[in-house]
Image: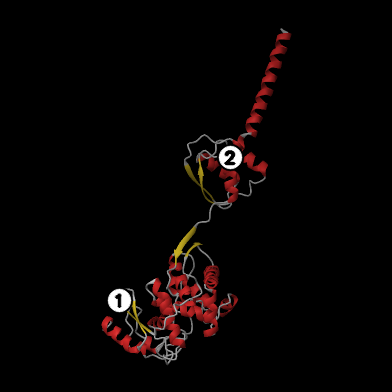
Amino acid sequence: MRRAGRKIAVALVAALLMGGAAGTYWALGYPERPRTGDGRLVEVSVAPGESFAQVAGRLHDRGVIDHPRLFRIYAHRRGVANQIRSGTYTLHDDMRPREVVDVLIEGAPDETIAVTIPEGYHMLEAFELIDERGIASRAELESLAFDESFLRDQGIQGPSAEGFLFPDTYDFRAPTPPQDVLRRMIIRHREVWNDVREAHAASYQRLREELDWTEREFIVMASIVEKEARKADESPRIAQVFINRLTSSRFRPRLLQTDPTIRYGCMVPLGGEPAGCRGWEPTDRLRRAQLDDADNPYNTYQHEGLPPSPIALPGRTALEATVSPDGSDYLYFVSRNDGTHVFSRTYAEHARAVDRYQR
């Protein structure tokens, strides 16, 4: 009987040892063992300050992991239990525990808001779109865009950031500091501007020497081309018309005579509203009061040369047209009211085109 008892005890101990070894082996393999699932997507949120135990419990409740205690032990053994990041995660119900921990450490993708700034918008219109999307305050953006210190730090000469904020589609976090919004748009402008200059290096250098222009003058001209051209293939010719008006001995005085500059002077006034703009609305047509208003520094019917700053945010097409105009000798153009224009070399030709299409 005693011998039989000893045999039973030995067998029990052996069984326990074997079971413990199997359990240890199973636990060690746990991080690489996929949970039994069908690949279903599961959304799990981790709040700031939550403990790893709370997160493990939620993952278990949502069907992402099967053994929250082992999950916690594994994360602690890796030394990463305090490295998980808050956010909303999209997980699968058949992931390996190691994969789940890796995702929690990496962090949830930043939630961003897309905003598209159309070509030809002026900066205040762009700021309104950004404000509407909850990214940054229009008032703060506008204040910064006129801030001399900020402009100097960004290498922008002139009264504002107008023209140096590239019109594009951006993904911003909400909220984003106003200075970060403007810097990103300025950086994008520089990228495109540098590409355009390199692609048209010979033409750009010739115009730069002929006109004695800096980057700023090119951007001013590009903004005017952006507002006047409705068809991309006409942009180089429209740019050439305005350059001819500034350089040709056949055209004096050097008046660009373009309506969008007057409108800009009324919508984004420098140093107070010009007298001719009082009572005028952006939806109104320009009338004699606006055309004759010398108080408006952007009135290119009254003031020779380029206006004080860009009047819009020019896109790549307008920039390319400005550094590579078509070389024609036209001095006038008038709209056909279908998006295209009639170009003329003499005022007599232009008058006939105006009579036909506008009067």
- Residue linked to disc 1: 337
- Residue linked to disc 2: 97
Decide which of 282, 56 is in the foreground and name it: 282
Identify the mark at residue 188; answer none if there is no mark: none
Decide which of 337, 188 is in the foreground and name it: 337
Q: Is residue 313 visible?
A: no
Q: Quarter holding the C terminus?
A: bottom left
Q: Residue at x 61, y 38 (%)?
A: 31
Decide which of 25, 188 is in the foreground and name it: 188
* Label 2 Cα crowd, 10 Å radius (few <14 / some 14-19 / many 20+): many
Check the image and report above or below for 20 versus 213.
Answer: above
Q: Is residue 99 visible?
A: yes
* Label 1 Cα crowd, 10 Å radius (few <14 / some 14-19 / many 20+): few
Decide which of 222, 124 is in the foreground and name it: 222
Point out the frontmost of discs 2 and 1. Answer: 1
Residue 210 image offset from top left, x and y in percent: 53, 84
Check the image and report above or below for 51 versus 204.
Answer: above
Residue 304 image offset from top left, x and y in percent: 45, 90
The extreme top residue here reads 1
Mark 2 vs 1, N-terminal side: 2
Check the image and report above or below for 135 versus 321.
Answer: above
Q: Amino acid at mark 1?
A: Asn
Q: CA distance from mark 2 to mark 1?
A: 66 Å
Residue 240 image offset from top left, x and y in percent: 43, 80
Q: Residue at x 30, y 76 (%)?
A: 337
